[in-house]
Image (cartoon, rainbow, N blue to C red):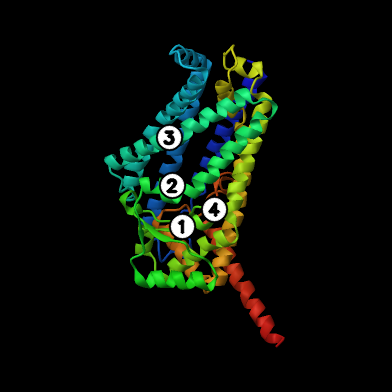
Amino acid sequence: MNIYATVILVSLLLEFGVRLIVAHLSLISLLRKPAESFADLIDRDRYHQLQRYTAARTRLRAGSEGSYLAVLLLFWFNGGFRLLDRSIENWGFAPLVTGVLVIGAIAIGRALVALPFAAYFTFRIEGRFGFNNTTPQTFLSDLLKGTLVAAAVGGPVLAAILALLGGTGRYSWVYAWSLVAGVCVLLEILAPQVILPLFNKFEPIKNRQLQEAISSYAASVDFPLAAVSVMDASTRSSKSNAFFTGLGSNHRLVLEDTLISRHTVPELVAITAHEVGHFKQRHIPLRVSIEILQLGLFFLLMSLFLNRQGLFLAFYVGQPSVHLGVVFFTLLYSPVAFGWSILVNWIARKQEYAADAFAANTAGGTADLAEALRKLAADNYTQLAPHRFDVFLNYSHPTLRDRIRALSASDRSSEQLTICGKGTA
């Protein structure tokens, strides 16, 4: 086993070990009774359900990650990459087509490992706790559509990447990075109109009072609300959410129908204000910029290792190729990706606090937003007090406890400023 194999193996095992420890810490940190601030929303029996749901999800995720790691290691140490490459090469296609097929086969293999866990989560865990509305037909339809979209978009892009990396010299990584960055931005723009409607239906808001309240709020903060849509999330799940999608003038605010059915108009305006806060503070372009920067780092480092003989020997492959180089480097890059995800999650949590503060300052105070967040946590069985290490590694949103505390602190600061202002008048 050479240095590349050692680094990759240790990284994979270490990351899996850390995730197991974090999962254990979060399980033992489950509160024995609901916090007093949730007593009116979650009684003891419902809270026990929340605990069981959290435990079931955590154990299933650990099982999924463990199964993927086991399959990967068995495939690796039995020469699976070499055998797969030779088998597809014997089909007689051009090298570029062979490369796309090899990477596609590896991607399909990974998806097949994850599929039983996804189905079990949807139909057993989500079903047992009353969240699942997805039929087997819808599940299979979504799976087929997702596969076709991935093939239609990913296949040509992957072919272009392999062609660029294999034949454009010293700066090939820059060209490949530019291509992928451009595709990412294009997908952000096209997703609201082209991709999302393949999976869900989007309709205008039918509640006139809600429509007028949201329009009035948007005007009050000088926000050009291009479109507000209601998504039929209830066809798949009883959970609820809201989000912005798209870039520039093509942005769309999406409220799930399950969200509208459970919240008052002031709460929905507060949720809208939170999403507008993300947009007004340019969180979405920042997120896309960070993703593009990460891609640049990935392609730069890959250019340094793509043709290293030792990297191929680590996987029992004697003849280097661009497509297997991409696969092997992706595994070598996993510690960097893990560390980068921690940084990205930290930034995302900061953005959530900022969006909450924006909503509180522009939508009539903290009460409606805090109540909406409490309802969302109760309805979606959100873990109320995960372990801090779990939050640090995995959470893109602050815990509900921390968000409520931040809103309360904002309220107190506003009161103090008001008192000081009155005192100096």
Mark 1 / mark 2, whichever is N-terminal:
2
Marks 2 and 4, the one that precedes in the sequence: 2
Q: Is residue 266 visible?
A: no
Residue designated by label 3? 152
Quarter occupied by the C terminus: bottom right
Which structural element holds mark 1? Answer: strand
Q: Are marks 1 and 2 in contact (CB under 8 Å)?
A: no
* Position above or below: 387 against 14: below
Task: Return the disc, 1 or 3, that comes first in the chain's sequence.
Answer: 3
Q: In the figure, is residue 71 to the left or right of 295? A: left
Q: Do labels 2 and 4 touch, CB within 8 Å?
A: no
Residue in the foreground of this view, choosing between 407 and 49: 407
Task: Calculate the distance from the C-alpha at mark 2 to the C-alpha at mark 3.
Answer: 36 Å
Query: Which three-letter amino acid code belongs to the residue tagged 2?
Result: Thr
Q: Residue at x 41, y 52 (%)?
A: 50
Residue under the image location 42 percent in, 43 percent down: 57
Mark 2 sits on what residue?
54
Marks 1/3: CA distance? Answer: 24 Å
CA gap, disc 3 and disc 4: 32 Å
Q: Kindly identify the amino acid type of the residue bearing the numbered disc 3.
A: Ala
Circle 1: residue type: Arg
Q: Answer left or right for 384 relative to 7.
A: left
| Marks 2,3: beta carbons within 8 A | no
Per the image, label 3 sits on a secondary structure element best described as: helix
Q: Nearer the viewer, mark 1 or mark 3?
A: 3
